[in-house]
Image (spheres, rainbow, N blue to C red):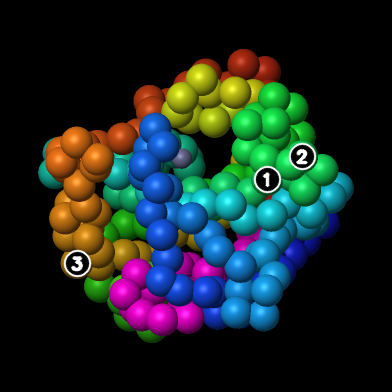
Amino acid sequence: MPELLLAYYDVPLESPLKLSSNGHLDLIIPKTTGGHKPYVIGASLNTQYEAESIHFHWGSAETLGSEHEIDNKRFDIEMHIVHRNMRYPDMNEAKKHPDGLAVLAIMYMFGRPNAITRTVNPKFFRGSGPRLNELFPKLKANNFFTYNGSLTSGNCEESVTWIVFAQELTMTKLLTSIFSSIQDSNGGHLKPNYRQIQPLNNRTVFYRP
Ligand SMILES: [Zn+2]
């Protein structure tokens, strides 16, 4: 399995970042200040996939909120960075094709950052010129699982190459106060939003150690 290349992930984005509530709450990824769209290539992807949006899955006080389990372990928070195959003009078209989307998934547990575990930089959400890689400091980006699967909301289209990083990061609970302070267009607060574990249905899951 080739390495995964994260292009322009370390370059400041235009700010402020915008939120869009389209079924679920998405953080729209703008161009960098240099005018480039961050993208990924490598692993089993044979073309460039442009970064479109970010969203999070979380649980409640009683439940963990990740959508993937690794070795039967569930995590507090799972972040998805959604990428569109550049061969397709927009998300609606990309969703119709098995190679339409690539989603990076990163697992977080609540905790305090220390020398080994790293945390999301809360400045990402508040500061100017945020960089995408501030969302996963020191992530071992070449240690991942990958398989062909589906979106986990809406019509769950079978259009996603999943890339699930094996390393668990930490997130301070402070950040969840940001989630819980966000309201949807009806003025409601966001609720736990993870899909239950699904059967593998004979898929092959590849692991890059
Ligand atoms: Zn998701």
x 41%, y 37%: residue = 22
Classify mark 3: helix, strand or loop.
helix
Q: Is residue 179 left or right of residue 61?
A: right
Q: Is 199 located above or below residue 85 in the figure? A: above
For the residues bearing labels 2 and 1, Cβ distance under 8 angstroms: yes
Q: Is residue 78 visible?
A: no
**Residue pointed to by mark 3:** 174
Mark-to-mark CA distance, 2 and 1: 7 Å
Q: Nearer the viewer, residue 85 or 158?
A: 85
Location of residue 141 (image quadrant): bottom right
Q: Is residue 14 left or right of residue 86?
A: left
10 Å neighbourhood of mark 3: few (<14), some, or many (≥20)? Answer: few
Q: Is residue 145 left or right of residue 168?
A: right
Location of residue 143 (image quadrant): bottom right
Locate residue 60, reporting x and y percent: 18, 41
x 57%, y 47%: residue = 82
**Residue pointed to by mark 2:** 88
**Residue pointed to by mark 1:** 84
Does residue 140 belong to the magenta stretch? Answer: yes
**Sequence-first tag of 1 and 3:** 1
Does residue 125 belong to the magenta stretch? Answer: yes
Q: Which residues are magenta?
A: 123-144
Kindly give the residue lying farthest to the right in the view shown.
46
Q: Is residue 188 left or right of residue 98?
A: left
Amino acid type at mark 1: Arg
